[in-house]
Amino acid sequence: MRLGEADRIVTFLTQGSGKVRAVAKGVRKTRSKFGGRLEPFTHVDLLLYRGRELDIVTQAETITSFREIRESYNRFAAGEVILESIDRVAQEHSKSVRTFMLLLGGLRQLSESTDPSAVLDAFLLRLASLAGFRPHLSACAACGTPGPHERFSVMQGGMVCESCRTGGAVRLGEGTVPYMTALLDGEWGSAAGSVDVRRESSGLVRAFVEYHFDRPLRAWAHVPR
C-alpha cells in the first residue's frame, strides 16, 4: 500500500508474530536501500523498529527470492491468490508456525511446478484445514457415515450421504475424491488426475474456500483455468 510520496506499508507473514504491517521508507525511490527485497513472495530476514501504530522496516535481507514465480504469469496469478488467502486467514500479531510453514512450502512448490493450478488448489485445501474448515472426503460431513459417497456439499462441509444431502449437493465424477484427497494430504505434486477431474476439483475448491472464508478472493479472476 502506497504511503506518501516514496514509502509503502508492507504486510508480512512472520513465523513468530503472525501477520505484521510495517512502513518501508523510501522503497519507491529508484535508489532505495531495499531494492527488490520487499517484492511480493520474497522470503526475507527482517529487522523492524517497533512503532506506536506501525513498525518500520530497518533491514531486509533476501533468503529466497522466488523469482520464478514473478517470471511466469500462471505462477504469479496463482501466487497472488495464495497471498490474498493468507492475508484473509492470518491474524495480526498472532503466532502460527503451521500457517507460516504452509505458505513457505507452497511458494517453494509453486516456484518449481509446471502446474500452478494444482499447487494452488492443494494450498487452499490445506489452508482451509488449518483454519478449521477441513473438507470431509472419506465420511459424510453431516452424520459421519463412512464413504464412499457420491455427492459433495459446499455448505455442509464435504461429501454427504443420500440421507443427509441437501439441494445444493452435487454428484462428483469418478476420480475427483481421490484426487482431492491427494491434494489435501499427499506430498506436494503427488496428485494425478484427468483434465475433467482436475477441472471439477478446482471448481469445488474455489466454491468451498470462498464460502467458508465468507468472501470471494479477488485475485482468482486472473488465474487461467
Image: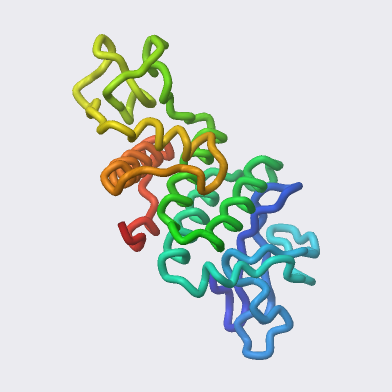
Residue placed farthest to the bottom in the image? 30
Q: In front here: 47 or 209? A: 209
Report the number of numbered marks: 0
Q: Nearer the viewer, residue 149 or 46?
A: 149
Q: Quadrant of residue 9?
A: bottom right
Which quadrant of the rendered structure holds the N terminus?
bottom right
Work out which quarter of the rendered image holds the C terminus and state it: bottom left
Image spot of residue 130 (x, y percent) = 57, 35
Q: Tell me the residue at 46%/42% (across/down).
A: 191
Q: Residue at x 36, y 56 (%)?
A: 220
Image-based side of 211 in relation to 182, left or right: left
Q: Residue 101: image x %, image y %? A: 66, 47
Q: Image point 47% across, 36% down: which residue?
A: 182
Camera-side residue of 125 and 174: 174
Who's the residue at 54% across and 37% down the image?
186
Q: Is residue 163 above or below residue 41?
A: above
In the image, residue 183 above or below residue 50? above
Give how far across and how far down residue 165 sits, in percent.
26, 17
